[in-house]
Image (spheres, rainbow, N blue to C red):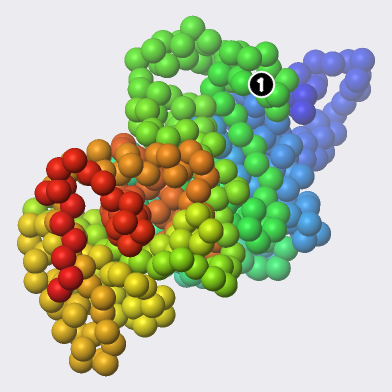
Amino acid sequence: MEPILSREEIASLPSLLPYATEEELQIMENYLATVSPGSFAQIVSQGRWKPAKHLAYLDQAIVDAIDQAAEEKLDGLVVSMPPQHGKSMLCSHYLPAWYLGKFPDRRVILTSYEADFAASWGRKARDLLELHGSLFGVRVNRRSSAANRWDLEGREGGMTAAGVGGPITGKGAHLLIVDDPIKNDEEARSSTFREKQWQWWQSVATTRLRPGALMVVIQTRWHRDDLTGRILHQARETGDRWKVVKFPALAEEHDILGRAPGEALWPEVFTQERLEQVKATHTNYYWSSLYQQNPQAEGSAEWPDDFFSAEIWFNEWPATWDCKVVALDPSKGVESKFGDYSAFVMLMVSDGVLYVDADLAVRNTTIITETAVEIQLAFRPDWFGVEVNQFQELLASDLLRRGQERGIMMPIYTINNQVNKLVRIRRLTPYLSRRQIRFKGGSAGAKLLVEQLRDFPNGAHDDGPDALEMALRLARQLFHEISYPEPEYVRIVAV
């Protein structure tokens, strides 16, 4: 999209408008304001908002996405770009005001990482229409003009602003904007936070959509499993229609803007030299995630991404098997962190392939016990291994006793791990490299286990990989394949 001329520039072009009157200029201005959020931004800012190349591309992508959503040909638009590159100004400041001016009977919901920040965008959009609503023939209703919820006078349209994770009240949305749902690295690294945010997206945010609505998720990427990552993963599984606009700070191969590799995204503001300095002074984790929009584990992950290609997933358990085991990492030891998971890993060996499912959740001891009995009832493993390091000694006995109370035989074996966890989990390497492990498709627990494997050893949690290694060890013990030089490394004792 070419930059739109300012009012003064239009008046200065006699070859185009040699006899333009003030009224004609006003008509032209009103028309240009309706073309796109970017053209509206240029007019109301009197040219201060500059349509950089990437912002002009995004501006057109937004207009196209709105039209496609109205025709029910598109569900959402994902925008991933570096910090301070203009995404929020266009998408959270100008877009809501322009959208309501152009479609005054539609509703907008805007959310961000906290309610006050979202309300600040609601206030700015409201103020724009209070000053420039005449461009569209609309006015803000004075009796309903709070920053976090305001309406248009005499029309059905209006805007609601809320924090991600909180309730959303109002009349639903034809345009749902999620702008920077993650506040900082601490939130991004918390799997508990990411799961809570995902539950909010599914149970609150998307339930507010009207027919033909467009979802716009604007995010600087922090983590592979952040909201954007989960949305796109789900879309691949369900066929949901999402358009992705991804702008790395320094261009890569096949850049959507046609930039040469290494060329800066916004050279007028952030030169290539400046971005190279940022790259040199940040870890690869931060550079790849925040600036290149390619989130990965901090430092060097233990295993390359191609260990976790699409072929690692399976849909149905094999009809025949050689053995079945379950391993439990209760994560109640002395080194446990708040929010650590209890991790159950179910492993079936069939024709030399390891089929795996998992159940990872934050649970107290009572719930761990009940979950173990339900897994035994459903999966029927030959052996059920329980880590008993530190403060977990009584758990195995609790599991056995609860199984007896319900008339279920629990083949409990205790595991006292003495080898460093990092060393133990690295024993998975040959199985992962040979693609010998398959994970249950459609299982939230298996998905989380794979994410922990991909992030190992730099992720916030490794409960799943720890339990997987123990399950593998149990299976090898059943096949009499365990052969460690020091017997105290593994102590598996029938209860």
Q: What is the x, y in percent for residue 333?
A: 12, 56
| Left-right relation of 19 to 398 | right
On the rendered image, what quadrant is the C terminus found in? bottom left
Q: Residue lying furthest front in this view?
A: 480
Front residue of 101/493: it is: 493
**Where is residue 287, by image quadrant?**
top left
Q: Is residue 30 above or below residue 380?
A: above
Q: Could you tell me residue 131's position as x and y percent?
A: 58, 44
Which quarter of the image is occupied by the N terminus? top right
Q: Residue at 52% across / 45% down in the picture?
A: 435
Q: Position of residue 227 (x, y in %)?
A: 48, 50
**Residue 45 at least partly seen:** yes
Residue at 20% in and 91% down: 405
Q: Which residue is mark 1?
A: 253
Could you tell whether 477 is left or right of 235 in the image?
A: left
Q: Amino acid at mark 1?
A: Glu
Left or right of 96 on screen, residue 488: left
Q: Residues within 10 Å of mark 1 (few under 14, many from 20)?
A: few
Q: Nearer the viewer, residue 387 or 190?
A: 387
- Please state if 19 lies on the left or on the right of 162 as rendered: right
Residue at 48% x, 51% y is 437
Q: Residue at x 77, y 61 (%)?
A: 72
SS for callout 1: loop
Which residue is more in the foreground, 459 or 73? 459
Asked which quadrant contains residue 408, the reply is bottom left
Q: Position of residue 463 (x, y in %)?
A: 28, 53
- Tell me if residue 123 comes above or below residue 321 in the rendering: above
